[in-house]
Image (spheres, helix red, strand yellow):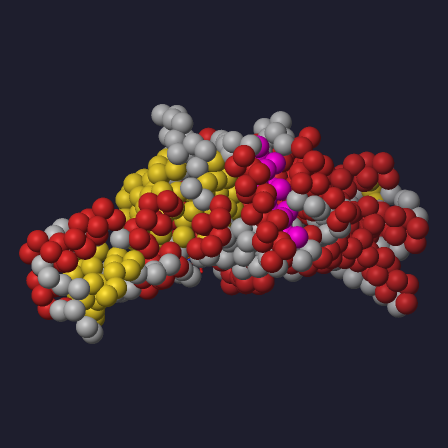
Amino acid sequence: MPSDRPVEARGLVKRYGPITAVDDVDLTVEPGDVYGFLGPNGAGKTTTLRILLGLIRPDGGEARLFGRDPQHELPEALDGVAGFVETPYFYPYLSGRKNLELLAAFDRDGGRARIDQLLQLVDLSGRADDRVGGYSQGMRQRLGVASSLVRDPRLLLLDEPTNGLDPGGMRDMRRLVDRLSGEGITVLLSSHLLAEVEELCNRVAIIRTGRIVYEGMLADLRASAGTNRYRLRTTDSRLARLTLLEHSDARDVSPDGDELTFSAAEEEVAAISRMLVGAGLGITALVPEQQSLESFFFELTEGEPVEAVA
Amino acid sequence: MTGALVAYRWELRKLVAQKRTYIGLGAAAVLPVVFVMVMALQKGGPYDAPLGHNLRRTGLALALVVLNFVSRFGAQLVAALVAGDIVASEHAGKTLKMILTRSLRRGQILTGKTLASFTYVVATTFVLGAAGLIAGSAAWGFNPLTNLSGVRVSTLHTLWLSVAALGVFSLPLIAVAAFAILLSTLTRNSAGSIVGTLVYALGQEAIAGLVHQSWAKHYLLSDQFDGWHGLFMSPIDWTLIVRAAWVSALFAAVPLALAYGIFKSRDVADD
Ligand SMILES: Nc1ncnc2c1ncn2[C@@H]1O[C@H](COP(=O)(O)OP(=O)(O)OP(=O)(O)O)[C@@H](O)[C@H]1O
Ligand SMILES: [Mg+2]
């Protein structure tokens, strides 16, 4: 049944022998999102995207693209959807333009008229009639994006689009994603670079050894990453700990040398400081922990191991 | 245009752009010329080959005699060279993920590849025929032919029969190509598919040599490469030709059905 929701995946599972590459993955991408699919090498990003594109069959769960199932309704489920996994590849003995013409023909000629304009967009006009065999990786990556846009998609699935690009190329690719999103295309892009996702995306799913460990707005991730953990030094650490545990909503109170760390909402912290002073303690330091989004990301993706072997 | 035709057209364009394609076509064009040159440098010749007694008397026999020579090995190799590569190369080149995420069905794409392979096989056969006709008549003239029953056939009639013979010869070659497509789909390995196809063709030849019941070998693929001989008998032996047609069709249909089954459901994650 067609729907407006670009991606809805529930409980996706894909096993390769003893490895569970994708383990119960849920994804929800809403129209207009630039959705970051973030995870370290081998986390299962590409495998998930392969399932979405109908290239492989999941062992469990189901996916919907605009309400259609890429496992059973190809090629219709890919109507309005374009993308590729890993590095794009083309026929090396054909020119860039011929490759795009071929793909446009495989799209039933929908985008043939747009090819020149797209070659210009990805800055390949000058080399369009050269054989792809002589293209650099960055050129192939750009041709890959052009080949997706030939389909005039409403949803673009990009697997590490800046992979292998030089800094300038990465910047251009990010600008392009930004621009496409501005034109109303929903984008799901995988990355192992937090900074990239921070720069481009509004929503994010973090995957680790096949499992989603965080899913939500990037803003909420920022909130949970840095601001709610505090470090406290007082004149009596033991008493301070008892006070926190018994009279406040502080969570995860843990001693650290002659200091304490705890989690609490910002309003709560103000109350805590008054309470501590009221209990006769002198506060020598009460500061938010400087945990960056980055270290939070590493904690999520590298913390206690998650059993990945079935 | 249907999806399969779109795929077919582009598969042809891809073949035209690949060097591999010209190995077979080039060999087919050169072989009759080499044959004439070798004949010119020596006295005798393969006069005992079917229609071989016509050599040096009419150029019309050349292509047909060469068909006998390539029917054991060369033609199969040339067919395998392209058909054994046609799916495997998409795996090796990692292009399958690009074309399978467009608007054509997997079945349509494989149909395009199959038709393109068959077209190549037929084209190679006819290139051999054309080169044989040109080289042969340049060397030995454009004279009537004495057929396998010892009856003289006019030049024009021989020409028509030769065209038909090339067509009949293509049939078992198409079946060989179908097997190569199956291996190409199954193994995803171009070289392996080419070698495997040759083993398959030579294996049929070997079995045909081993079985004593002549009726059994009539239903192997190897025998169908001689089906066109029926055209050069008086009267025309339709049994040979009809058998070549249906046995080849059977030997093509089974591998193709298997290849479709694999190609349609296979996971594409090999890059
Ligand atoms: N075809 C396959 N056969 C066997 N194992 C596979 C296959 N494809 C993926 N895997 C395994 O599944 C896991 C997830 O791989 P995947 O390629 O999806 O990760 P990824 O998140 O895309 O990683 P990267 O950032 O390196 O691209 C890995 O352990 C990988 O080895
Ligand atoms: Mg990957």
| Residue A251 horizontal/vertical position (percent) | 16, 55
Work out which residue is located at the far bottom of the displayed protein and give it.
A257
Regarding residue B220, the answer to whether it shows in the image is no
Q: Which residue is rendered at x = 61% and y = 59% of the image?
A: A166
The magenta segment is: A139-153
Q: Which residue is rendered at x = 87% and y = 51% of the image?
A: B136
> A126 or A104, which is in the foreground?
A126
- Residue A143 belongs to the span the image colors magenta: yes
Say which quadrant the N terminus of chain B sits in. top right
Q: How many marks?
A: 0
A280 horizontally vs A289: left or right: left
| Residue A144 horizontal/vertical position (percent) | 60, 47
| Residue B35 horizontal/vertical position (percent) | 83, 60
- Residue B246 belongs to the span the image colors magenta: no
| A52, above or below A139, in the image | above
A158 horizontally vs A234: left or right: right
> A76 or A28, which is in the foreground?
A28
Give the overall secondary structure of the magenta segment: helix
Q: Which residue is rendered at x = 78% and y = 55% of the image?
A: B26
Q: Which residue is rendered at x = 37% and y = 44% of the image?
A: A219
**Quadrant in which residue B47 is drawn:** bottom right
**Quadrant in which residue A302 is drawn:** bottom left
Regarding residue A267, the answer to whether it shows in the image is yes
| Residue B118 horizontal/vertical position (percent) | 63, 43
A228 horizontally vs B26: left or right: left
